[in-house]
Amino acid sequence: MGLTMVYDPVLLWRVEAGRHRPHQTDYLVTDEGVRYGEADGPPDPTTPERIVFLGDSSVYGWDVDYEQCFAAVIGGQWSGGAAKRGIFNAGCPGYSSTQSRILLQINLDRWRPTRVVIAAMWSDMMRTGWTDVEMFARHSSWGYRVGGGLRQTLGHSALFRLMAALRGAPKIPPGRKLFWQTIGDETFDGPPRVDPETHADNLRAMTAMAKGIGAKVTLLILPNTWDMQGKGPSDEAEVYFRNFHRVGEQTGAIVVDMSKEYAGASRAEMPRYFVDEIHPSPEGHRVIAERILSAWR
């Protein structure tokens, strides 16, 4: 089957667990939403090196085989390949930094990463007719599944407080689609899904969670095609870019900034590094992996 997205009461949507064969690729996804290749098997949380990758479809690996994703490439090369079974490619098409933050908090104790790579940004900037606050307020049903003493206990957790705040947003009229259902629709006006200030807060929260268990954090600004098209990033994009650097300075996280990676390239070179306007090609993933590994060494 192709890529199937299903409703999730906490995260709003996720890739369905099982086998997927979109665009002539073939891979599997765990119940936790982690993509993996059949040859390697699902990631093993008992391996010494456990690297979690968070973000949207550019991290997930849109239209490329699992082995070509930069997460998998890093797994095959880092520590002499010792990290290969400890790669948690937890990127999901359409995931914002808010969803990545919730996903990490849900699975942190289970995955116990030694490194976390955070590349959440592109979906935050998108204007789809919904903000994340609105989507969680209307579509998340997590609150109805928690009651009594458990609700009182969970009330002390950061995840519960975050979800309660999102659920507490004003209700909005029906008739609009969730983000991933709007693909191919017209462009919407209005605010971005996640505003820059909240994006920065999410980066800080994910970094703090990871560092709290001793994991090393890498904040990754993914490359783009703007320079190849003869135009630089928008002023808005620059604000999100600065969030990565500011949080890196505040927390000591490594920042890998690839926003100008292809500044000297021409539009004719786009197909070499991208499968479309934003998603890396196999060669693009290889370059990303190379830059991350260089920063780690």
Image (cartoon, rainbow, N blue to C red):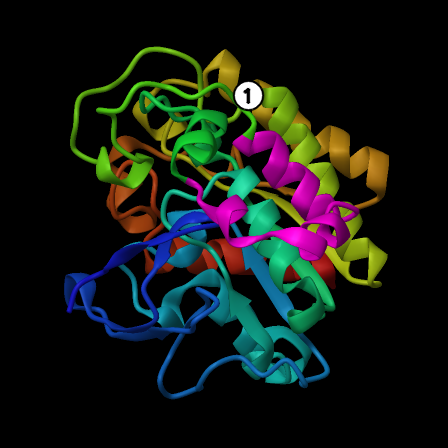
Q: Nearer the viewer, residue 84 or 261?
A: 84
Q: Is residue 128 above or below residue 288?
A: above
Which residue is at a point 69% across and 57% down the rendered structure image? 150
Q: Going by the image, does 274 lie left or right of 219?
A: left
Question: Residue at image x 43%, y 24%?
Answer: 131
Relative image position of residue 24 (x, y in whole percent): 16, 68
Instruction: Let me know if residue 58 appears in the view.
Output: yes
Q: Residue 228, relative to residue 55: is it above or below?
A: above
Q: Quadrant of the C terminus?
A: bottom right
Q: Which residues are magenta?
A: 140-167
Amino acid type, callout 1: Asp
Inspect the magenta stretch and tell me whether residue 156 lies in it: yes
Main SS, magenta residues: helix
Q: Nearer the viewer, residue 227 or 29?
A: 29
218 or 112, nearer to the observer? 112
Residue 295: give x, y in percent of width and height.
Answer: 70, 55
